[in-house]
Amino acid sequence: MQDALYEQLTTSQREAVFHIEGPLLVLAGPGSGKTRVITYRIAALIDAGVRPHNICAITFTNKAASEMRQRAITLGASAGAHISTFHSLCVRILRRYALQAGVRAGFSVYDESDQTRCMKQAVKDCGLDAANFSPARMLEAVSALKNNLVDAEAFKGQADDFFSKTLAQIYSRYERLLKERNGLDFDDLLMKTAFLLERHSDVCLEMGNRFSFLLIDEYQDTNHAQYRIAKALVSGHNNICATGDPDQSIYRWRGADIRNILAFEKDWPDAVVVKLEENFRSTGKILAAADKLIAFNKSRKEKKLLATKPEGVDVDLSVFEDGTAEAQEVVQRIKELTEQGAMLRETAVFYRVNAMSRVLEEAFIRNKTPYQVVRGVEFYNRKEIRDVLAYLKVLVNPSDEVALMRIINTPARGIGKTTIERIRGYSGENGITLYEACKRAESISDISAAARAKITVFVSMMEQFKPDIDGRAADLIARVFCESGLQSSLEMGAVKEQGALENVEELINAAVQYDAEAEDPSLLDYLQQVALFSDADSYDASSERVALMTLHAAKGLEFENVFIIGLEDGLLPHERSFDDQEEMEEERRLLFVGMTRAKTHLNISWARYRTFRGQMLRTIRSQFLDELGIDAGEAHEQDEPYCVDDADDQQEAGSLPRFVAGQAVRHESFGIGRVKEYVDMGENSVVIVRFNTGQIKTLMVKYANLSKG
DNA sequence: CATAGCCGCCTTTTT
DNA sequence: GGCGGCTATG
């Protein structure tokens, strides 16, 4: 096998594929054939005598995992190799070593909305106001702590100021709630696994033997907990191969620590580092623009993007009147490209925030152009999906109060607030779970006979489902959907529930697929894994439709034709990044990732007006547009240049221009910047500007000769 | 106890 | 402009 593969690789790719033993870092720029290298590497390991069973490959998303599995199968190399995300792996480890990890194996995986529910409760339990201690904020803080492996106990010890102490209290309470419900949140999966491996040398040894070769893709986006897990897993053999690109690190906000990849050589001093700098994906002009842009990042190791393709056509920069015009023109150009032979599945539109998909969708529908929106977690967040899954969760994990509360009266079966409160009271007094209390409804004195009967019916229904737990997940979902009354309540529901039935059908189809493909299918495993799925995993790259997605979702993909819309100040870069240099650089990397997805045609645009929170607002062009080094500027101006149309805002001719905070301005020698403050003093007015170089200048308007944009 | 309607909140990105 | 939560009403 090796010879055949060998011929298809460049020198550095060969090094990355065939360096078998010891730590290896592959610094792979965009379009450098990284995916191919990883797949071939798995094949090469097996060729070298490693049992597939002993190979563990970690990907960033479930979709990447299933694609890698697919590719490896094509090479005849996959069977037995463990390929999954960190989170999926952790679920399996925790289940297997539940005792040592201090968890109960039947745990529910709590996703964001389950977490929010628990956090709200925790804040309330602590007697705090949700306004001052917003659950979202608290979750963010707790998540950051968990990602850094600081558990509630440890944090309590180090909290010294008022806020930390309060947070510590909330954290403990939140943990207690999770424990009572036997729930683990996403961060727990990592933290508990890291602790398990670090504190139980026997487990660590066993896992290290099981996986004698560890490959981690997208290493630049691993967080501290994941780093510690990796470190522990390979501690016995150091056979770690990490691949990634610091310039494509876009998950800092989620705890990703770019230092992991930057410090790889310190962590594994005998590491071999291979750089893949040739780009086989994009044309020269696209790469040149991306390279110019990313060069503006200061905290960065310089890296070359070596084009192997010809120059190609210019990157297209356009400005439109508003978001609707922008969307219309995007579709129009896609039509033109299609007439020239382009495929819709080779075409994608990227944007910064999910909300921007709406205008696009309308344009695609209007123009009868097939598209698919690749969304985050929308599908599994739908009410009907969560409802069905909640039934299953209660069956598998009766302690899961979040799930039980969701279904106890869904569909409506006459168990109201008062009744639930009384059952709750009873469960508290007797130290039993809510579900246990429901089972004992007969002995709860303060519940009416009618309510008692309804609870009994509910419990006996649930108990009747239980024998089916060991069967196929899909069958049980179908049965629960029907017998719980959810199905008929949806069927009788209003027209707006139309999609709901189809959604559940889709869920069942997905479960059928799970039953067929999973290594060791069980309802418990299904439920624990399903929480880790996102819609992006179901993106169908082979169907002849244009893909619409956020820039984050675009990671790891490639298309012939790419449109990036909404290059506006506050959107890209996003306003929440303004006051943090690091975050501004991440925004730049985000655009860099988007641009480098394009093989042939790259179109970047912005709109002068954009509807925001239902209101049409004037925008400011993104500073990033000026960093692309495309001198022709907006060659495809749809009408007169952007600075001229500001005329309606200006005072009568002859007076000085006025500026407002946040506005982008250009200075002859200082370059592009943003107005911090405008002090109106008539003809002596001054303007304070923060330039993109970082320096802040106070300038007299009448001398500075600042221009807008 | 269920439902409809209203108010006020937030809204970046996602495993 | 969408959703969760609350209230008033049936």
Image (cartoon, coloured by chain):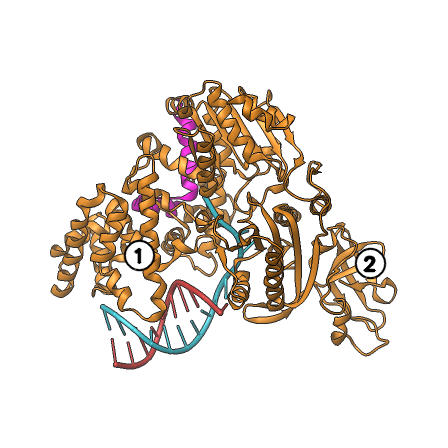
Chain colours: A orange, B cyan, C red
Q: Which mark is residue A667?
A: 2
A467 relative to A348, above or below: above
Q: On what subunit does the disc labeled 2 rest? A: A
Residue A428 can be seen, yes or no: no
Q: Is residue A182 magenta?
A: yes
Q: What is the residue that sits farthest to the right in this orientation?
A: A703
Residue A663 can be seen, yes or no: yes
Residue A471, image x, y percentages: 22, 42
Disc 1 is placed on an element classified as: helix
Residue at (26% x, 51% y) in the render: A477
| Front residue of this view, candidates A501 and A2 | A2
Q: Is residue A129 magenta?
A: no
Hey, which quadrant is residue A607 in on the image? bottom right
Mark 1 sits on what residue? A387
A602 relative to A331, above or below: above
Residue A608, image x, y percentages: 67, 67
| Front residue of this view, candidates A73 and A267 | A73
Q: Main secondary structure of the magenta part?
A: helix
Q: Is residue A240 left or right of residue A412?
A: right
Residue A262, image x, y percentages: 62, 33
Disc 2 is placed on an element classified as: strand
Instruction: Give the magenta range.
Output: A172-201
Q: CA distance from mark 1 to mark 2?
A: 57 Å
- Which quadrant does the C terminus of chain A fall into? bottom right
Hey, which quadrant is residue A192 in on the image? top left
Q: Is residue A2 left or right of residue A490?
A: right
Crowding at label 1, few (<14), some or many (≥20) Cα neighbours within 10 Å? Answer: many
Hey, which quadrant is residue A198 in on the image? top left
- Amino acid on which disc 1 is placed: Asp
Residue at (74% x, 54% y) in the render: A626
- Amino acid on which disc 2 is placed: His
